[in-house]
Image (tube, rainbow, N blue to C red):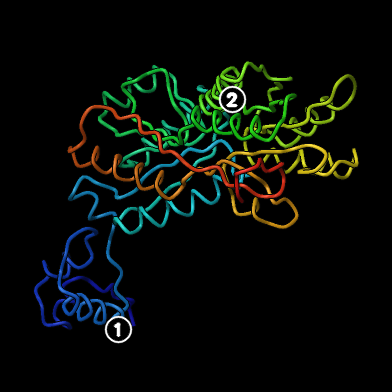
């Protein structure tokens, strides 16, 4: 017996509705009654029907796919944020296509060209940068683009970040209140706005109290570089009594070096503060005091901005900074009057 493909007309006859009604049920974002949706989807399931998304994209001019470019997924913040992004976009009827790219503009440009070939409706750049030539091409082709957790010198690009500068100042206030005087910083990559802004916030917060950083080492958002920086800070001369580490991913490596190689206990011998508040931060192994990046609110803001651009409802470029609290745990001395 030949394998006859089930069509939307077949589903319509089985459900006792019109073919356009079947199309509405399977079109993301179109509202139908719950009873009608259940009726149509039950018939579709019984017949083994699958909607033809390619045909729909040819008709509507939309692929209902968003391209995400990310430099690395070993940082737990991005794996957690990716899960939230995928879920939130799915709720809005969009699928997500993930591409990896090295953190330099030429590689990102090549990946974006691949995404354009896949006819994505919009692009999210997470932890990577884009060249001006690329942004000009995207503007010409009217492909919406938004930066996630990364700023850009081109202020015509929309971006969503945490309040990185303010977060760095919060860490300074907390550590100074705890009586620390030799406060070092193992920063995130200083070529990225996130790493740079957190570092500047720390320096400004210390300056408010007449202090300067004991040392600043670029940890490059790398566990290996952060571990090497920690060893260097304790290799000779006065050691720091506190270290602000540019993200949790690096802070975990610093804690491991302090405990396993140097015999120092975070929170007692030296205070350690991170940035992100990924799930591992609360583990008893780390008990990391850290600035929380409000990933849920950041993801919601990115999705709202991007879909507004896709639908032609977006205002001029917006640069959204979302503040997050300092989460106090056991890896740093708690000042009097402060509570975990």
**How many numbered marks appear?**
2
Question: Residue 255 falls in which quadrant of the image?
Answer: top right
Secondary structure beneath dot 1 equals helix
Secondary structure beneath dot 2 equals helix
Foreground disc of the pair 1, 2? 2
Q: Residues within 10 Å of mark 2 (few under 14, many from 20)?
A: many
At 56% from the left and 41% from the top, the residue drawn is 291
Q: Position of residue 199 (x, y in %)?
A: 59, 23
Relative depth, front residue between 303 and 327: 327
Question: Residue 261 falls in which quadrant of the image?
Answer: top right
Quarter of the image for the N terminus: give it: bottom left
> Which residue appears farthest toward the front when viewing the image?
337
Question: Residue 25 falls in which quadrant of the image?
Answer: bottom left
Q: Which residue lies under the disc numbered 2? A: 202
Q: Which residue lies under the disc numbered 1? A: 46
Residue 167: give its label.
Answer: none
Q: Is residue 118 left or right of residue 174?
A: left
133 over 299 or under it: above or below: above
328 over 46 or under it: above or below: above
Of mark 1 and mark 2, the one earlier in the sequence is: 1
Q: Is residue 195 left or right of residue 39?
A: right
At 80% from the left and 29% from the top, the residue drawn is 228
Q: Position of residue 280 (x, y in %)?
A: 65, 53
Relative depth, front residue between 153 and 232: 232
- Whole-angstrom CA distance, mark 1 to mark 2, is 61 Å
Q: Residues within 10 Å of mark 1 (few under 14, many from 20)?
A: few
Q: Position of residue 68 (x, y in %)?
A: 44, 41
Q: Position of residue 144 (x, y in %)?
A: 30, 34
Q: Is residue 264 left or right of residue 152?
A: right
């Amino acid at each position: 017996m030949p394998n006859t493909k089930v069509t939307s007309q077949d589903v319509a006859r089985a459900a006792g509705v019109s073919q356009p009604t079947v199309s509405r049920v399977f079109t993301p974002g179109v509202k139908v009654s719950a009873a009608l949706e259940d009726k149509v989807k039950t018939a579709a399931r019984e017949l083994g029907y699958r909607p033809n998304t390619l045909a729909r994209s040819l008709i509507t001019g939309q692929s209902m796919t968003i391209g995400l470019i990310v430099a690395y997924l070993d940082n737990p913040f991005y794996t957690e944020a990716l899960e939230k992004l995928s879920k939130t976009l799915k709720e809005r009827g969009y699928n997500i296509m993930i591409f990896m790219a090295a953190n330099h503009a030429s590689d990102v440009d090549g990946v974006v060209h691949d995404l354009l070939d896949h006819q994505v409706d919009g692009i999210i750049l997470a932890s990577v940068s884009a060249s001006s030539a690329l942004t000009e091409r995207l503007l010409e082709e009217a492909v919406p683009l938004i930066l996630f957790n990364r700023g850009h010198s081109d202020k015509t690009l929309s971006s969503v970040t945490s309040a990185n500068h303010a977060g760095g100042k919060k860490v300074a206030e907390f550590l100074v209140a705890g009586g620390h005087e030799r406060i070092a910083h193992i920063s995130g990559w200083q070529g990225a706005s996130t790493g740079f802004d957190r570092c500047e916030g720390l320096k400004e917060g210390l300056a408010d109290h007449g202090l300067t950083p004991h040392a600043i080492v670029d940890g490059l958002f790398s566990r290996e570089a952060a571990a090497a920086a920690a060893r260097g800070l304790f290799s000779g001369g006065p050691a720091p009594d506190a270290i602000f580490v540019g993200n949790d991913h690096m802070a975990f490596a610093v804690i491991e070096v302090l405990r396993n190689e140097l015999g120092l206990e975070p929170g007692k011998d030296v205070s350690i503060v991170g940035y992100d508040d990924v799930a591992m931060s609360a583990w008893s192994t780390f008990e990391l005091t850290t600035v929380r990046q409000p990933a849920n609110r950041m993801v919601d803001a990115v999705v709202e901005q991007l879909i507004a651009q896709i639908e032609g409802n977006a205002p001029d470029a917006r640069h959204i900074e979302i503040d997050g609290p300092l989460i106090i745990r056991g890896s740093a001395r708690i000042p009097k009057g402060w509570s975990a």
